[in-house]
């Protein structure tokens, strides 16, 4: 939360599975569209929060599998764990507050008496979360009886059913909604101007009851969430049931509620007429790498104008320092890029940028830092990148680019065109 020194323009709080991430879309198109939008138009003044049922272990696994941006805050294990930044620094104070009338042993003792409850994997059993699978048809009866027994044993708990399969027992003060309320109190006078919560299943319902938030239930939302909405929030104009799935539904909601720019650069850029927004270094970086992706995938026509446009963005005597340490003049890299049209057509080649930040360091000079990710086939790699940009009347000129491997052990054959 230290990243911004004034109130966030938008705080976006999103569930992951089947909300931000569509497990039925292997190409991750919608997610990549969201990523480009966020980095170009929101990253610099807004907050991204993931709120997931996953434990830290399987949250990290998902981040390795999918092109997920780095959030500012991560709420995990159905709102029982809150962590900050890239290194997931835990909020110990939050976890301590959940001990009130909570005793894990009593929960496991009582739940063991139900043959219908099938324990989830060890990784998903957390200090303030005990999780099972239970058939849809049996769920409501089990919940009713279990709840009564746990109350009888002196606990103050809540039971949440999600995805028509998963049952979580948590302390009453926990959950995604409570965790968000706790975070909102922490802003202390710097509350975000607008908050958008996004979800698809039962454990997301609480998010929609947090006062003052906009909400989107993605088109593919589960029956239990839609039912909850029908009973509890039907007249709430600030909740949208999107017509689009997952991340596309989130983008749709940004537009619907007028929370900011809602067309992803991935959809905007059909030619290289980019940088309509002249002084936006985030957009500049997003658009450049998109152009590289489209060129190498052969999605744009092989025209001299396209490559000329790209070339005109780079200072003639600029230098690219590759992560391997090799230095190359820009013109050599651009020459190699020019030759690579369509070369990645048969690979699932994708490029995206994460954590874009920029600082104006002179009257017309910006220093821009970002993580540049590249996926080809199943292989993923990341370069921490610094670029020096100079603002001219016609837009930015790239003066210098410097990269290093995010994971310093990565060995790599140098591909000369790789910015
Ligand atoms: C995630 C968690 C699981 C939980 C479910 C529903 O899938 O891994 O433990 O039961 O979310 O909240
Ligand atoms: Mg979900």
Image (spheres, grey):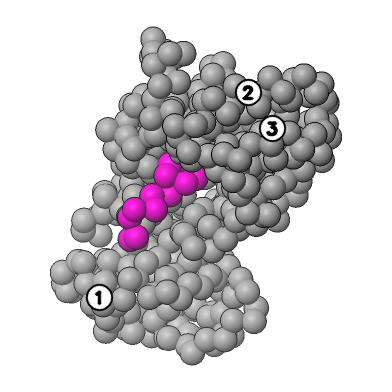
Which image quadrant: the C terminus? bottom left
Say which residue label 3 marks: 170
Query: Which residue corresponds to the image point at 53% horizontal and 80% vertical from the top-left?
Result: 322
- Determine if residue 5 is in view: no
Query: Which residue corresponds to the image point at 20% horizontal and 66% vertical from the top-left?
Result: 300
Q: Earlier in the sequence, mark 1 or mark 3?
A: 3
The part of the image, by quadrant, that contains residue 60 is bottom right
> Residue 314 appears at what percent x and percent y?
39, 70
Q: Earlier in the sequence, mark 2 or mark 1?
A: 2
Query: Which residue corresponds to the image point at 42% horizontal and 78% vertical from the top-left?
Result: 418
Disc 2 residue crowd, few under 14, some 14–19, many 20+, Cα 10 Å: few
Q: Which residues are magenta?
A: 14-27
- Is 239 above or below relative to 313? above
Disc number for residue 345:
1
Q: Earlier in the sequence, mark 3 or mark 2?
A: 2
Closer to viewer: mark 2 or mark 1 = 2
Q: CA distance from mark 1 to mark 3?
A: 48 Å
Disc number for residue 145:
2
Task: Out of 371 and 96, give the one closest to the viewer.
Answer: 96
- Determine if residue 372 is in view: yes
């Amino acid at each position: 939360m230290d990243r911004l020194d004034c109130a966030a323009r938008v705080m976006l709080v999103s569930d992951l599975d089947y909300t931000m991430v569509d497990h039925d879309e292997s190409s991750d198109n919608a997610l990549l569209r969201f990523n480009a939008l966020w980095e170009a138009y929101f990253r610099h003044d807004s907050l991204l929060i993931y709120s997931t049922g996953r434990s830290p272990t399987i949250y990290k696994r998902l981040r390795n599998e999918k092109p997920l941006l780095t959030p500012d805050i991560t709420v995990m294990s159905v709102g029982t764990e809150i962590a900050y930044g890239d290194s997931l620094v835990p909020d110990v104070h939050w976890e301590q507050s959940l001990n009130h009338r909570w005793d894990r042993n009593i929960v496991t003792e009582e739940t063991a008496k139900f043959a219908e409850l099938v324990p989830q994997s060890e990784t998903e059993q957390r200090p303030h979360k005990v999780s099972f699978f239970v058939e849809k048809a049996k769920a409501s009866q089990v919940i009713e009886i279990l709840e009564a027994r746990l109350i009888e044993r002196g606990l103050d708990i809540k039971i949440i059913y999600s995805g028509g399969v998963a049952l979580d027992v948590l302390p009453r003060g926990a959950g995604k909604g409570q965790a968000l309320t706790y975070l909102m109190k922490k802003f202390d006078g710097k509350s975000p101007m607008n908050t958008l919560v996004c979800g698809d299943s039962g454990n997301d319902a609480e998010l929609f009851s947090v006062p003052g938030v906009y909400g989107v239930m993605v088109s593919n939302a589960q029956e239990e969430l839609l039912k909850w909405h029908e009973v509890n929030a039907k007249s709430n104009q600030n909740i949208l049931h999107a017509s689009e799935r997952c991340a596309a539904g989130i983008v749709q909601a940004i537009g619907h509620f007028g929370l900011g720019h809602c067309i992803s650069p991935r959809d905007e850029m059909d030619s290289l007429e980019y940088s309509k927004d002249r002084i936006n270094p985030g957009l500049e970086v997003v658009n450049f790498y998109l152009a590289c992706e489209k060129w190498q995938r052969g999605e744009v026509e092989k025209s001299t104008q396209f490559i000329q446009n790209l070339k005109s963005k780079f200072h003639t005597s600029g230098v690219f320092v590759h992560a391997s340490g090799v230095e190359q003049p820009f013109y050599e890299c651009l020459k190699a890029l020019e030759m690579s049209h369509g070369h990645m057509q048969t690979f699932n080649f994708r490029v995206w940028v994460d954590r874009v930040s920029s600082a104006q360091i002179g009257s017309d000079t910006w220093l821009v830092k970002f993580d540049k990710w590249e996926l080809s086939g199943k292989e993923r790699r990341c370069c921490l990148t610094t670029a020096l940009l100079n603002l001219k009347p016609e837009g930015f000129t790239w003066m210098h680019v410097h990269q290093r491997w995010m994971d310093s052990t990565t060995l790599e054959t140098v591909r000369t065109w790789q910015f």
